[in-house]
Image (cartoon, helix red, strand yellow):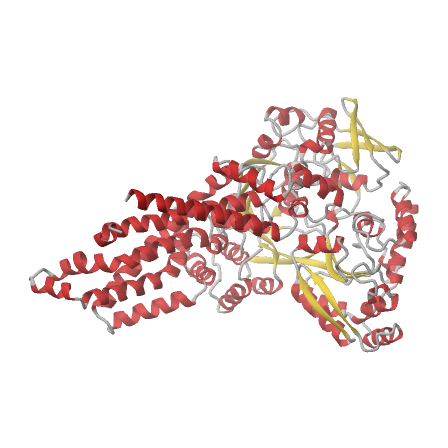
Amino acid sequence: MHLGTRIGRLTIGALFAGGLLYAPTSFAGKSNDTLVYASDSEPESVSPYHNDVREGVTLARLAWDTLIYRDPRTGEYRPMLATAWKWLDPLTLDVELRQGVGFQNGDKFSADDVVFTFNYVVNPESKVVTKQNVDWIKSAEKRGDYEVRIHLKTPFPAALEYLAGPTPIYPKAYFQKVGGVDGYSRAPIGTGPYKIVSVALGKGVKLERNANYFKDSPRGQPSIGKLEFRVIPDHETQVAELMTGGIDWIWRVPPDQADALKANPKLTVVAGETMRVGYLAFDNEGRADAKSPFKEKRVREAISYAIDRQAMVQNLVKGSSHVMDAFCFPSQFGCQPDAVRKYSYDPAKAKALLAEAGYKDGFDAEIYAYREREYAEAMIGYLRAVGIRAKLNFLKYSALREAQRAGKVPLGFLTWASFSVNDASAMVGVFFKGGDDDFTHDKQIIDWLNAADSSTDPVERKANYAKALGKIAEEAYALPLFSYSSYYAFTSDLQFTPDADEVPRFDLAHWK
Amino acid sequence: MIAFLLRRLGLALAVAFTVSIFAFALVRLSGDLATTIAGPEATSAQIEQIRIEYGLDRPLWQQFDDWLWHAARFDFGRSFFFREQVANLIAGRLPVTLTLGGLALAFALALALPLGIVAAIRPNSWIDRLALVLSVAGQAMPTFWFGLVLMLVFGVRLRWLPVSGTGTWRHFVLPAVALGYYATPAIMRLTRTGMLDVLGSDYIRTARAKGLRWHTVLLKHALRNAMVPVVALVAVQLGFMLGGSIVIEAVFAMHGLGYLAWESIQRNDFPVVQAIVLILAVFYIGLIFLADLLNAWLDPRLRTP
């Protein structure tokens, strides 16, 4: 998202080194109880169902509440707008709602709002952008003033996870009064700990603490008085603003800049692991080429042994990233990295496997990638060392995805962030359950995943995921590489903890 | 003069039309719009649904035809990305870009014209050398880098001016300098060359011989004639500044038209890209037309074909 970064970063780095950027005072932030945070992009609409950027998710979690709350630190589900929930059968979920909760305009929260929200978002006319977050809902039905029944299209055990994340509740009366989503996105309200007081398209959003936030909320009461979100596209500018105290918090700081910022005593730099997992996708079915070497298990195994993922983590990705063994993120329900075959770095074994598979002299291949060119280049180096002469084909994401769906990608360096959904179905389910993006079609894995996803019994789900993930690793259908890490930099006056789902929770932050 | 005007207008329309065809085609070539709009994690079914919702399943010529007829009535449709009318989006961002472009040009002229004139009067003096150094530096430095340096020195170190944003006039100072400085060398060198040519000509000697005062000769006779090529250049430079402020707008977080264009290109938000390209093309054509008029006023010989 930034222009001409390298030279800019070097400039900033040089000036840091020269001590030119030492910031003597800080005048925003703690002193006026306003936390100004910046990011490089803006949500196209503040309405949480009508944008799919992180900045929108951040606002959604600040100004709205969901039925269920997943404690980001323990992973435990706790009541929020719902007080209790019960599965009648795999297609029907009964929810009891909390009484005495109010929206930020004073309207009382009740079953009408929940029913309205869910029925609204599944209606195609609502033009919801985050379709994958609500596609599992068939409809919602009012059973009493504080009782709601949710009907599902198909069994979907991750439903609780979705009800605890990307499904905030809208105020029915207010939404209709302001004339639908266009009016609503200019002056939205929710029940959340912060109230949006102004929305300036292209500039940012201002929020204030919701003084009437309901007392029993599992999130507790917000501490910081005012929040301001500013859109600053350029990373160097963000750093300059942070240095002068013009803003208090930035994220996605590149590793080299993070190192430079650490030298400043007024700033705190922390690394947080994220749910984004990088992986190599192989053309297991030989769709790009009927004689594709990637159809051969030993070739895929060879590549899995050829790449020094640990070295990449230490020298390139850095921060809090880890090597991934299973095709999922470890905190996701069902993800069991210990239950799968592990590939260590062993180029000799890789060469032997290639020779065994009939590629003694290696072969030419094309690797497709869309982000972190340097990671792709490092992998090309490792592949060359064992005889695979890979050429980089760097595309925009949409183009790569199209090419992959059209079966034109023999080897792809891809990543997946699971939409921050803490359930393995959000990753392994997308690529191995026979859907649009399943380019393997392993019948056995499809069956196991279907069994896992149609059961509401956690033990059974886990057992089936272990089998599916185990076979993916055994057959080397894909090579999980590493988790991504993100650096956060903020004023040392602030107490802030990053979470793996990359949702900055300013409602849990406070001044020191 | 009327024929001249009409010819210019017809040419302008033809250019605008050609530009819109190019913009339309280029946006389509850069990737599937429905896939981009649907977002990274959408399924094929969702993508198909969006294709139909946004009318992207229709033949290309039909989509273009539809757009063109609406655009002719200043209805640029709705942004695919922002839930907003394109016309509103542009109207909201245009003032920032126009202010920035205007200030940058003012800065460039204020620096380039006096320096160029003085350099021409005293060729090879220290001030001529200084002007040369300034113009080489201006040409060599990438704008974003110069912008960052200005930001670090005046915003971070000295704290004289705000680092980024568009809140007050003070926010415009650094970006206008960064953007304007880039245009300075060309204007300055052209002014210097033009002045040198003119100052060596017979009519200047005659004017001097008539006993006119030196500064009258300089401003009324020499400068007026030396300005003809400069005016044309300035019009082009202002066009560059309006369309080319993308980098500066991004560096200084100034949410203007340039930044909107860049954002929209990234997201394949083609109604916005199309509208911006068209509007900038129209501006450009307008500026060149203005330059022609101005030159016709400066140099009467140009008025008769």
Residue A199 pos. (x, y %): 54, 38
Q: Is residue A390 left or right of residue A253?
A: right
Q: In which quarter of the image is residue A87?
A: top right
The residue at the point 15 percent across, 66 percent down is B202
Q: Is residue B201 left or right of residue B111?
A: left
Q: Is residue B256 visible?
A: no
Query: Which sits in the foreground, A65 or A234?
Result: A234
Residue B74 pos. (x, y %): 48, 36
Q: Quadrant of residue A228?
A: top right
Q: Can residue A125 be seen in this view?
A: yes
Q: How many labels does the image show?
A: 0
The residue at the point 29 percent across, 48 percent down is B293
Query: Which sits in the foreground, B171 or B210?
Result: B210
Q: In this view, does B262 lie to the left or right of B46?
A: left
| Image height of A15 relative to A138, above or below | below
| Image height of A391 relative to A446, above or below | below
The residue at the point 74 percent across, 29 percent down is A119
Residue A399 pos. (x, y %): 67, 54
Q: In which quarter of the image is residue A132?
A: top right
Q: In this view, does A446 lie to the left or right of A18?
A: right
Picture quarter with the N terminus of chain A: bottom right
Query: Which sits in the foreground, A454 or A443?
Result: A443
Residue A210 pos. (x, y %): 61, 34
Q: Residue furthest top?
A: A144
Query: Which sits in the foreground, B164 or B189?
Result: B189
